[in-house]
Image: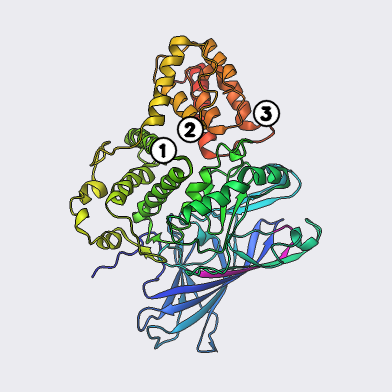
Amino acid sequence: MTVDVDPTTQANYTSIASEHVHFDWTIDWAKQVISGSVTHTLTVREDGVDELVLDALALDVHKAFVETRGQGQSDNFTLGPSHPVMGAALHVPLPSGLKVGNTVKSTIHYSTTKDCMALQWLDKEQTQGKTFPYLFSQCQPIYARSLAPLQDTPSVKIVHLLRERSSTIPVLLSAIRASPPSDGPAHDGKVIGKDVVTYTYNQAMCYRVPRSRQSGAGVAEPEFVDAAYWEFGDAINNFMLKAETVLPPYRFGVYDVLVLPPSFPYGGMENACLTFLTPTLLVGDRSLVDVVVHELSHSWFGNGVTQAHSTHFWLNEGWTTWMERLILQLLHGPAERGFNYLIGYKSLKDDLELYKDRPKARTRMTRTAKSHWMGLQNRLWAGWMFLPYSITTAEWKSHYKIKALDSIDWDGWLYGEGTELPVKMQYDVTLAEQSASAPTRSVCRFPSMTGLLANARPICIVVFLERLHSYPALPATHVTLLGSLYKFSTTTNAEIRLRFYESSAAKTLAPEAAKWVTGEDGTGVVKGRMKDVSKVDRDLARLIEKDLGLA
C-alpha cells in the first residue's frame, strides 16, 4: 500500500513521530529574536530508524542531542541545504536498535532569525495604542518550521507545553495557561513593560470531554478591549451552544478570541483555543460577529479532524464552511443558510474567472465548491467518525459505505473542471430574491426610496451593492447620494464600505477610500486586512496608472 506522504515536509514522520513538544523560550524584543530550546518526545514507527529529520527554515541551530532509555547522547546534527520553499532538513542521529513503540527524546537549542516567516514583530508605533511593541505568529501553511525545528505537517498531531521566560510584556498563547493564573491580574499584577514574568501554557489535545469548557468574549489591546467584549461576548457563547447541538462536545477546554492590531492581514485564523480576528470586525452593532462561526467550526474540522496535508486542504475548509452554514441556519433560519450558499457560489464563479488569468491568485474555490458537496452528502448521510485523526481524501471517501451515496459522481466533484457543479443544488432563495430585486427598484425610483434598506441585514446590503455593480454605471453624483442616504460612506461595517468603494464612482471615491484604509477617516484605525487593502490599493493603482498615461 502506497503511503500518501506530505510533499511539503522533509521530516521522516512516517518512521518516527513527535507526540509531545516542549518549548522553552526567551523573547528578545530589542533584537526581535526568540531563542531557547525545543524538546521532542517521539514514538518510533519503523524498526531500525537511525535518524530524526525535522523541518527548519531560517533558523540558527546551535546544538542538538538525543536521550533514550535515560542515556544522554553527545551533540551531533547536520543541517542540509536549504530548499527555496521547504527550508532545510535538520538531521539528528539516533541510537541503533530502535523498535516500533520505543520512546526517544531530542532537544534542539536554536534561535529564530530576521527571516522568520511565522512571526510578525510590530514596533509600538504600529499598534493601536502605540505604547508597547507587539508580536504575533502565523504558522499556516508551512511557516511553523521557521519558529522551531519541527515535523511541520498536519499529519503529525502533538501535545505541547511552552514556557516563556523573562517576558516584560503579557504572553497569550493558543493553549491553556498554567501560570500565572489566567483569572488573575494582567501580567501577574506586575508592571507591563518593566517587570519580568514567566508564562507557562499547556495544549493538551485531549480528545475527551473536559471537565469544564469556557467560551470567552474577547482579548485585545486596551484600546479595543471594551469594544471586543461588547461585540463578541454573548455571541460566542450562543455560537458554541448551537454548535454543540449538532456536533460532538468542544474538546479544547477554552475558546477565546483575540482581536489583533490593525496590521493583522486576515479576517480570522482558527488557532486552537484562541481564534485570531481582525479589528475591522468591531463594527459597534454586532453585524459581523457571524465571522466567528467559521473559525469556531474549525475546532472540529481542521483542529479536530485534520487534513493529512495540503493536497487535501478541501477537507478542512469544505467541511468547516458546510458546518458554518448549518450553524447560521440554527441561528437565523434556513433562508440565511441558503443565502450564504448562493453568495458562496457567486464567489466561486468569480474566483474561477480570476484563476484563468491569475492562476497563483489566492481564492476561495476549495472552501466554496466542497461546501456545496458537503451539503449534498448531508442530505443523504450525516455522520463522521474521524476525531482526532489526520486524514486523506481516500480515507475519508472509504468511510462512506452506505448505498445512498453510490449515485454520487465522485470524480466529478473531486477532479471536475468548469464553473458548474456536478449537481444543480437547490437552496432557500428568499433573501437572495429580495436582495436581487432591490437594485432594480432603487434604480427605478432612486433617490426617493430612503427606507429600502433601512432594516436589511448587512449581508443583504452587501449583495445589493454587488448586484448594483452589474447594472449600467450610475453617475458619480447618484452614487455619492446613495452613500449619504444609506450611510454606506460612513458605516463602520468594512464589508459594506468596501463594496461601496468598488462602485462605478470608484475614481470619485478613491481619495475617501484611501483615507478609510489608512485610518485618516476620523477613526484612527488602519485597515490592515488583506482583502480591504488589496482591493483599495489595486483600484487606486489603476487610477494612478491611468492619470500618468501608463495604462
Instruction: Name above or below for residue 462 compared with residue 122.
Output: above
Seen in the picture, residue 452 relative to 350 is either above or below; the reply is above
Q: Which residue is mark 2?
A: 459
Mark 1 neighbour density, 10 Å: few (under 14) some (14–19) many (20 or more) = many
Which numbered disc flags the more N-terminal residue, 2 or 3? Answer: 2
Q: CA distance from mark 1 to mark 2?
A: 9 Å
The C terminus sits in image quarter: top left
Indicate whether residue 160 is drawn in magenta. Answer: yes
- Residue at 50%, 47% (x, y): give it: 293
Q: Earlier in the sequence, mark 3 or mark 1?
A: 1
Residue type at the position of mark 1 = Asn
Instruction: Report if residue 548 is visible in the image.
Output: no
Q: Residue at x 39, y 88 (%)?
A: 97
Q: Position of residue 261 (x, y in %)?
A: 64, 44
Q: Which region of the structure is painted magenta?
A: 158-170
Image quadrant assignment for residue 11:
bottom left
Q: Is residue 494 magenta?
A: no
